[in-house]
Image (cartoon, rainbow, N blue to C red):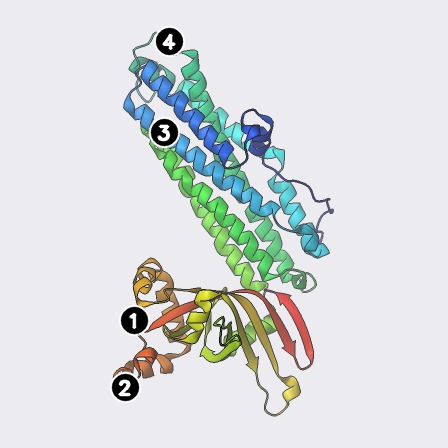
Amino acid sequence: MKLGLMQPPKKYKFLQEHVFEGTWPFSRLKPPFNVFLLLLIYFILGLTLYFVYKIPFIYLFAGVCGAFGLFLWTISIFKYAKKLRNVEIERLNSVTKKFHVEFLEYLFHPSSIVISIFVFLVVLTYFFSSTSFGLNNILSYIQNELSLNSLPPLLIFFIFLMTFDVCYRLGLSIFIIFIQLRRDFILARYLKNPLLKPHFSATDIRSLENSDIVHFLAIASGFTLIPLGFLDPFLLFMLLAYVLFSFLLSIMNIIYLRILYVRAIPDGLLTLIRNSNFAQIGTISLSSSNKIPHVTPTLFIFDGRDFFISTSLSSKKVRNLHKRNKITLFIDSKEKKDITQSFGVQIMGRSKIYGHDSKTGLFFGLLFSPILIRVFMLFLRKYPNYINYYRRYHEKIPRAWQALPIVSRTIIKIVPKQFFYWKASRTNQVRF
């Protein structure tokens, strides 16, 4: 399977980043301050035109929303580019290095501007040909609304500048989504190849997903552009169609990456995790009198991405994790007849407590209720007898052990970072 030619590492940047770095006064500032400056310029220019030409308030409102949307998108896209650039390409093996560099070469290619220019030309054509308001075009309608013989050059420049800025971002986001989907399909082919799959770790796939979520937030900022469509029904329809289309595509991309994340986990390890009911959990005690590891047995579930355990709010592990979120989970399969066939996995990662006491528990319970409900259903599916026992003998069980969310129990999520997978005397370290 051809991976493409290896390219030397370089500073990948979007076209807008090059423009900011090469244009004064933006070149004098670093992100996000140069983006704040752009927003300030738009506001000052827009307010000046509003007061000088007595523009109707609806135009000012649409312009403010548009400028704010451009600001949010630019902040997000710069952060997205930074996360991708922060990947230490040199630490990757030769296969994943080629895969990642090829993705960056396509993503940051200057040809992305082609889609943006196409969108701009379509919108510009519509501006000069639309008859939605019974006049020659939208520009004629604006001129008539302002009671002017002709539109001032500064106002035309501002309209075209805002239009191009919006179209550039719309075009670039669509380009990014398709490059992401192309990357995912290639990754799926590699994971099906027994020779190539071991080169890809679930950790790298999760990093790609975290980066794509940042771009998803940039797309979400497109909803602030909707007021621009209030000026024309067709523009409103097109903006809504674009936002929904890109929104759904981006969600599909993130979901697909989560599926590939599971596929990247070694088959034997995945079978062990899914078939095991018990694990040992280790935390770090930071008290002055007891600086030793703390290990306890626990039930757990794995949702294909993260591990979850349920524990008492008053447990020592909760107190330890509240001070330091480092955690280790150990799962093994004990072969009584032949101990040389025993195997297990030691998972190291970071934890997240959904409410560490009754006060914050209520807040977290409301904020993360969909997650908590899903985790409860997974526990119920895996340990039905355990859950039913706690329900039946609820009053006879000590308060700390009662299955009462927020009141006595809490959920701890374990985000895996790496693990040691061993079988008999052979040990492998795998980046999860």
Foreground mark, 4 or 2, reads 2
Residue at numbered disc 2: 396
Amino acid type at circle 4 is Ser
Q: Where is residue 128 in the image (x, y as percent from the top left)?
A: 42, 18
Residue mark closest to the camera, 2 vs 3: 2
Residue 322 vs 298, above or below: the answer is above
Which element carries disc 2, helix, strand or loop? helix
Q: What residue type is labelled 3?
A: Val
Q: How far apart are marks 2 and 3 (CA)?
A: 61 Å
Q: Nearer the viewer, residue 141 or 361?
A: 361
List the single residue furthest toward the left: 395
- Residue where numbered disc 4 is placed: 150
Q: Distance between the residues labelled 1 and 4?
A: 69 Å
Label whose residue precedes the other's in the sequence (4 or 3): 3
Instruction: Identify the image quadrant of residue 131.
Output: top left
Crowd rating for badge 4 (residues with CA inside 10 Å; few <14, some 14–19, many 20+): few
Query: In the picture, residue 12 is in which quadrant?
Result: top right
Task: Provide the residue designation for mark 1.
Answer: 407
Could you say which disc has been placed on residue 64 in the image? 3
Q: Which amino acid does label 2 sit on?
A: Lys
